[in-house]
Amino acid sequence: MRLRGSDARKNIDMNVLENIIRMQIEQAGPMSMAEFMALALGHPEHGYYMSRDPFGQGGDFTTAPEISQMFGEMIGVWLADTYMRCGAPKQFVLLECGPGRGTLMSDIMRVTKTVPGFQDAMQLHLLETSPTLKKVQGEALSNYQPQWHDMIDSVPTDAPIFIIGNEFFDALPVQHLYWRDGQWFERKVGLDGETFMFVGTDAQPDHVNLIPDHLGAPSNDDIFEFSALSRSLISAISQRIKAQGVAMLFIDYGHEKARYGETLQAVKAHQYAPILDNVGECDLTAHVDFGALGDIARSQGLHVSRIVDQGSFLKALGIEMRAQNLMKNANEVQQNDIQGALARLTDPKQMGALFKVMAATSYDIELAVLV
Ligand code: SAH
């Protein structure tokens, strides 16, 4: 490693993770962006999610379940409905991917308590890598004996399964290919002295093959963004649903049809930040390519729903009526909060249109809202 007196010393003190990545690049050459992002978010000791609770006012960002209980309640209604429609199995696995603070699941639990048989038949499983968030989830869900998994492989295979996730796929690593002078290159992270910078290397043919035909011929500097981990996870999730029976539901910000362009962004304290700065201190996310996820689920033999806006989905499940009911017993300040949260979750100018919902099932049951 290159040392430049007090400069290098300052860097070591300031950001251990940046130094770890610098050392890897110096030894092995430019790093794929997916690896960079995986380390920034998930390095076992210094990764963004590993040591902190990033949600809410004092954190870096807010998610739908943290805005209002009504979000989780509507997901609970959807799950209860799907459970009844598929014949109320005597035993089933409920798996949440990336449960954050466990807020979504505790709201789901409050709603499904009233559904005959649901909670007796349920075994709760959580896919989560962050030790800090596992602890928070354990406190929120202590009545339901959840079991945690770092990887989907260890989730039970012997019962029907419902798999859900909110803002899970957007946290998984992405990579960029770019087109320059008649050729695809991969954008990697290299070094200019001590500073991280993007560099180009020849793209791998198996990555180029992922570019869907509908994108058409590229022009100079067009970027193709993809997430290899999201692809392999949706494939594993789909195989489970096909083999064990029943459904998945994912909500995230993203698009139904991929276009050329990049959506990777860094956020710190509710503000955008440069992607290569303050590594491990910012949340990194990218828009989810629901078109690609849906195609993979379909290729595994699942019935894949329409991709619906979050606002329409929540309204069709009755969120407005729920807000009216909550307001009946609320004071003026609480009523304003409920109305504000309803708008934030459903208004197309806020989260209503940018966030999408996708479901898929093992057999052709009619899903509420999503047919
Ligand atoms: N669903 C929550 C949290 C979203 S943030 C909410 O809506 O509030 C993303 C979540 O995914 C966090 O819990 C994070 O720790 C988890 N996560 C990120 N990468 C993961 C991975 N590779 N495997 C499992 N969980 C992961």
Image (tube, grey):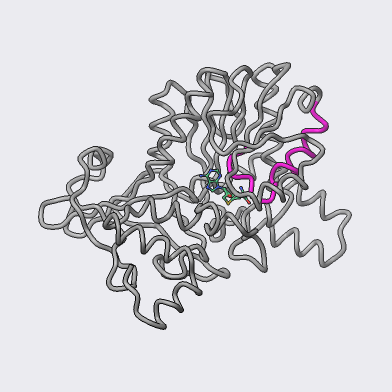
Q: Residue 93, relative to residue 265: is it above or below?
A: above
> Looking at the image, which is closer to me, 65 or 101?
101
Q: Position of residue 172 (x, y in %)?
A: 46, 48
Determine whether, in the image, residue 81 is placed left or right of residue 177. Answer: right
- x 66%, y 62%: residue: 56
In terms of depth relative to the viewer, which is nearer, 181 or 52?
A: 52
Residue 184 colored in magenta in the image? no
Where in the figure is residue 165, as x and y percent of width and height? Answer: 58, 41
Position of residue 74 relative to residue 113, above or below, is below
Image quadrant occupied by the N terminus:
bottom left
Count numbered badges in the picture.
0
Please provide percent x and percent y for residue 137.
71, 46
- Asked if residue 275 is positioned above or below residue 263 in the image, the reply reads below
Q: Which residue: 13% across, 51% down?
A: 183
Residue 111 forms part of the magenta stretch? yes
State whether residue 335 is above or below residue 244: below
Of residue 170 and residue 10, the one placed in the foreground of this image is 10
Horizontal arrangement in the rendering, residue 146 relative to residue 14 (left or right): right
In the displayed structure image, the side of residue 225 where residue 79 appears, left or right: right
The residues colored magenta run 96-115
Nearest the viewer among 326 and 252 is 252
Locate residue 257, reporting x and y percent: 36, 44
At x 56%, y 60%, the residue is 350
Quadrant for residue 214, please give it.
top left
Residue that lies at the very extreme toward the left in this rendered image: 182
Q: Which quadrant of the structure image shows residue 60?
A: bottom right
